[in-house]
Amino acid sequence: MSSYKQLTYEQRCQIEVLKKSGFSQQRISDSIGLNQSSISRELARNTGQRGYRHRQAHMKACERRQQATRPSKMTAAIIELIDAKVRQYWSPEQISGWLKLEYGKDLSHESIYLRIWADKRVGGDLYLFLRRRGKKYQWRGSNGKTSRGQIKNRISISERPSVVDEKKEVGHWEIDTVIGKGHKGALVTIVERVTKFTRSCRVASKSAACVTAATIRLLTPYKKLVLSITADNGKEFAYHEKIAAKLQCDVYFANPYCSWERGLNENTNGLIRQSFPKHTDLSKVSDAAVRQAIDCLNKRPRKLLGYKTPACVMKEKLAALVA
């Protein structure tokens, strides 16, 4: 007998996207891997006057859950700690993990988001310290349909070996692009899942040819530690077979609208954006400035690495190959 599980924030994002695309409840349930009755119940409970919206739905569900369980975790002292860390640009997930490690408080990142949105409703500014600030997803194309084409011979992330998810084997990378203001200039960003080591450079355009050449150039010095690369479904990765052949690795693609499947890369792009905000024309940024920003990122101590730096850990892994 299976136990009941609450829908996650990511699943509600998927429900909203698929519903807007005209999917039936049955097709939505098949796509997400839930029962059709769960989708029906979710839509009935959490659809507002303006239709089903994932943030509103998640907030309503969390509020009902809080009222049902009457938790006492969100004390005044905990709220003070949360507010202080948010103002230091910590993400709710980082705060959640820190509270558990330092204080033994098991508080979910969803609860911290609720605290931030509650603060916003009364005129607070905590949400301004979030990297994404809860911005709505902007559809590509018209009539709710994406304009992106299908990538030939695409290999789904579902076929990626499970060892990649365990984050114990070095050599599995995530790749993406960061676009400049007005689509002027772009960065190719690649990060290794275990060491958090990042490679990046400017490209003249987001074309598949430019991105492919940059990817091969960035990763060739680390070729012995390139086993797989996971990308999103952008057309800039259409020449993935050439990348796989040159680097002798496998290239996988995340599911559409599932950015959390490349969560490390998304987080790394957010850190890079601190150096090059969205209003930056990347065509005017120098290569030296990009190298400096990435160098600082790689020399930043990381808690997940025992406060070693990504550059140090990658150097150790490379040295071990020739030892």
Image: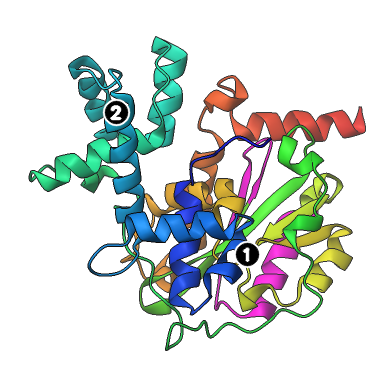
Q: Residue at x 22, y 18 (%)?
A: 75
Left or right: 244, with 309 as reference point = right
Image quadrant in which the N terminus is located:
top right
Foreground: 290 or 196?
196
Q: Which residue is mark 1?
A: 31
Residue 81 x/y as whole percent: 26, 21
Comparing labels 1 and 2, the label whose residue is closer to the camera:
1
Q: Residue at x 60, y 71 (%)?
A: 27
Foreground: 159 or 288?
159
> What residue occupies the far left of the structure in this picture?
123
Q: Is residue 213 magenta?
A: yes
Q: Earlier in the sequence, mark 1 or mark 2?
A: 1
Image quadrant in which the C terminus is located:
top right
Residue kind at label 2, given as amino acid type: Lys
Q: Which mark is residue 85?
A: 2
Left or right: 322, with 92 as reference point = right
Residue 129 x/y as whole percent: 26, 43
Q: Disc 1 and disc 2: Cα gap in Å?
A: 37 Å
Please tell me how crowded label 2 is: few (under 14), some (14-19), or many (20+) other residues with Cα within 10 Å. Answer: some
Q: Is residue 61 above or below residue 317?
A: below
> What residue occupies the far bottom of the structure in this picture?
142
Q: Is residue 43 magenta?
A: no
Please tell me how crowded label 1 is: few (under 14), some (14-19), or many (20+) other residues with Cα within 10 Å. Answer: few
Q: Which residues are magenta?
A: 191-220
Residue 289 in view here: no
Residue 92 in view here: yes
Residue kind at label 1, given as amino acid type: Ser
